[in-house]
Structures are given as C-alpha cells and as structure tokens.
Image: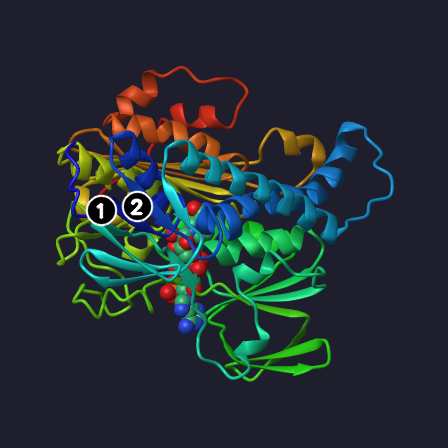
Amino acid sequence: MSTDKRYDYDLFTIGAGSGGVRASRMSAVHGARVAVAEERYLGGTCVNVGCIPKKLLVYGSHFADDFEDAAGFGWTVGERAFDWPSLIRNKDQEIARLNSIYRGLLQSHGVELFESRARVLDPHTVEVAGRKVTAANILVATGGWPTVPNVPGKEHAITSNEAFHLPEMPRRVVIVGGGYIAVEFAGIFNGLGAEVTQLYRGPLFMRGFDIDVRNTLADEMRKKGIDLRFEADIAGIERNGKTLTATLKDGQALETDAVMFATGRLPNTRGLGIEEIGVELARNGAVVVNENFQTNVPSIYALGDVTDRVKLTPVAIAEAMILARVLFKGDVGPMDYRNIPSAVFSQPPVGTVGYTEEAAREHCGEVDVYRTAFRPLKHTLTGRDEQTMMKLIVERAGDRVVGCHMVGADAGEIIQGLAVALTCNATKADFDRTIGIHPTAAEEFVTMREPVSGGD
Ligand code: NDP
C-alpha cells in the first residue's frame, strides 16, 4: 500500500475493543501506520465486562449443580462453601493477563497506543492526550454501554458493568430485562446460591429467539428455582440501609440486596466529536455506515457495537478483518451477515443459527419443522429433571436446513459445528446421511426423521 505522508497515521482507531484492536492490527499487517486510543481497558467489553468474565462466572456457578449431580454417580461431596471474593479475584487476574496480551499484540505489530480519551476535531484530526494528530482514516470502534430506564431510584441499581466487581455476593437479586445479559446473570446468581427474581416486561422473554427456545428456557430456569415473572416491570427502587425495595408497576414490593438492569446497551458516541463534524448518527446514537463501514464523512469509518447491528464479538472481528482489507489492500468485500450463530450462556445454555421457525415461514415459504426434547443421558442417574430441546427448520422447496436451535448442555459447542453446515447450504438429506456420534446429545440433530409440523 502507499502511505499518504500528509498525515501522521494511515489509520487512527478510537476504542481498543475486539473490533478496534483487530482492525488496527490487521491494518498494520497490511503496511499501514496505525495508532489506537483507549481511555478505559484494553480488550473492550468482551474481555473486561462481557463475554470472558461472564463465562468464567457461569463456570463458577455451575458447580452447585455438579456437586448435587455427583451423588447419582456414587460420590459423596463434603461440605461446600463458596467465596465470591476468590472468584472475582481469580477472574480479575485472568483479565489482567488478557489485557497484557492485547497490549503485546498492538506493540508487536507496531501500533501506537494512546491510553487516553480521543475526540475527533475534523475529518482527519483527532485530539488525544493533549495533542492533535492527523490520520488519513479514522475508525470509530467505541462499542456500547448499558442503558438503564429512567425509574426513580435507578441510582441504587447496578448493570453488568458493576456486577463483575461487587465486593460481596448479594443474597437476593432482582434482575430487570429478558435478553442475553438478563438470563445469563439470572443463571449465575442462582447457581451461586442467591434468590433470583427476573422481571420481563412482555408476555415471554428472549424476544427474537425461536419460540421453542423461549418456552424451554423459561421452563428450565423456573425448575432451577428462578422466580421468573413475565408482564412484570419495575416502577422504582428505594434504599433502606443495605436493603433495597423494588416496587413493581402492579404495586408489589420486593425486598432485595441488589437490583440489576440488563435492559440493553446503547452505542458509545457521546462526546466523541463526530456528530459535530457531520457524521450521521441514528436516533439511538449508532453510527450509520455503508457496507464498507464508511460513514457519510468519507474518511470516517465505524464497526462493531457502535454501529448497533449485530452486537457480537466475532462479528466485530469479522468486520474489522474486512475493513483492514478495504482500506489497505483495495479489496471490497461485503460482510455476510447471514447464518451468524450465537450462544446464550444461560443455564441450560442456548445455541442458535439461522432462521427461527417464525422467520423461516416468512422468508422461505413452506417449511418442515423437526423437534425433539429429551432428558440427557447424564441425568438418568442424577435424577435431575432437565430437558434438552433441539429443533431443525427445513425449507421444503429446496430441502435446505435454514435454522438450528438448541437448549441444553454444550449448546454453543454443538451449534458452532452446525453453523458450518448451514454456511455450506446443507440440506436435510445431508443431515440425514451424516453418521451420528453415539452416545451424544448432538447426534439427535442427524437422527430426527419425522417433521412435527409442515408449512401451511
Ligand atoms: P438485549 O437487547 O438482548 O435485551 C434487553 C432486554 O431488556 C430485552 O428483554 C428488552 O425487552 C428489555 N428492555 C429494554 N428496555 C427496557 C425497559 N425500558 N424496561 C424494561 N425492560 C427493557 O440486551 P442485553 O443488555 O441483554 O445485551 C446487549 C447485547 O449484547 C445483546 O443484544 C447481544 O447482542 C450482546 N450480548 C451477547 C451475548 C452472547 O453472545 N452470549 C451475551 C451478552 C450480550 P424487549 O425484548 O421487550 O425489548
């Protein structure tokens, strides 16, 4: 690539999260002179207050069930005690290690790091650490931030950001919201022994997921003792010493030690200076970009959560790989947003790829639906009443599998493999001729023969 010497850098990235670091690093690999500014923590939400610490807490909380289940296999597990500060300390140590890996990755690729807030002054100038620097291209990769509804007493509540650093484990928790973060933390706190009440404002949580996933997960979370309430929302919070009282819209009052809002995340664009120089933002603050991640100001780009499209780390990383090529290799390759798999690390977890049954009926015409629900082999000895649910949605005209959904142990691990099949346009006949691995739960995905319902 040729470098424009009028500017200090070829690329200045704001935000060293998953997307920003990958775009910076790959641009440097393609020969660009790159700098990145980060005011908070290297690795962004995913590494510091998202995917990674969340999954560590999920592992930690699962031991309660594992100790109980061990009895069915002949084990006597002695006295158990859980120490929240140890878990948090160990988790923080691991995150510090990851932060330094991110730092090393930037350094080893020659990317200059400013550990400071950056502000865009004009289409090629950024103010950072008291200096003005110029760049041919500016990338906004500032991610998102939890948003909390404006209810009286909201200042007494926490979000996922604080949940990762609580000095002690709350004995009782009220979680507001019915999406990814709400169900994941309901499972974490429940597994660690707290009394959990989860409030969702609509008739059924996990909007956007397949209907059988939503119903199965609700049943399983209730079986684990989570007080899951639908058509329930919070009206206000009062503090009385260490105790909080959450008043619901129907007038009920819940005494609790913590109220956690998991009511969505908004793009982080405030105070960046981009609106002032004419970069188009959506009503919720998201940066509006074209298929090459370019804003209406041609030298300014954005990707990842700040664009509020698909808020998932691997998507931001894939976008970053494409952007680096677009900018410094001259390639133009639109990102393929079809068949993005995802997992929710609820307990039990959810894995999903492709269309929900409802969306498949809308986009694919007639469909056949295959579904199975069973008690996993492990639980025949534990006695645990837990169901695994698996579902395939097949486009009748072309026999293509257009959706795979699962609730059950290892759902994320299983669906990752099936996502490859969907990306390759696998048909139901391809699934049928695939030999199962016995005995696994996953083999059910290749042995479902009779549709439960057809298209109409
Ligand atoms: P989600 O958008 O998934 O869920 C927000 C929830 O809060 C919804 O149930 C929503 O209800 C509800 N809600 C929104 N506003 C209000 C309000 N004012 N009062 C009451 N309830 C409200 O957001 P999350 O915060 O859970 O997560 C943000 C994103 O981060 C996710 O969408 C996902 O992309 C990503 N993520 C991915 C994870 C993974 O891959 N495992 C894990 C965690 C996050 P309604 O449905 O009615 O709008």
Q: Position of residue 40 (x, y in %)?
A: 47, 56
Residue 318 in sight: yes
Q: Is residue 367 above or below residue 187?
A: above
Q: Is residue 413 above or below residue 135?
A: above
Q: 353 or 388, which lies in front?
A: 353
Q: Please tell me which residue is depicted at 43% across the width and 36% down the height of the picture.
A: 107
In the rendered image, which quarter contains the N terminus? top left
Q: CA distance from mark 1 to mark 2?
A: 6 Å
Quarter where residue 423 is shown: top left
For ligand 1, give the image quadrant. Answer: bottom left
Quick check: 435 left or right of 133?
A: right
Quarter where residue 371 is shown: top left
Q: Please tell me which residue is depicted at 13% across the width and 34% down the height of the picture.
A: 330
Mark number displayed over residue 47: none
Taking the view exactly as shown, the residue that stands out farthest to the right is: 78
Label 1 secondary element: helix
Label 2 secondary element: helix
Amino acid type indicated by mark 2: Glu
Quarter where residue 19 is shown: top left
Q: Position of residue 146 (x, y in %)?
A: 44, 64
Q: Is residue 165 above or below residue 147?
A: above
Q: Please tell me which residue is depicted at 15% across the width and 42% down the height of the picture.
A: 4
Do the numbered discs 1 and 2 sit on residues whose CB atoms are within 8 Å? yes
Q: Position of residue 211 (x, y in %)?
A: 38, 51
| Residue under pointer 1 | 361
Mark number displayed over residue 357: 2
Q: Tag 2: Cα neighbours inside 10 Å, few (<14), some, or many (≥20)?
A: many
Residue 453 in sight: no
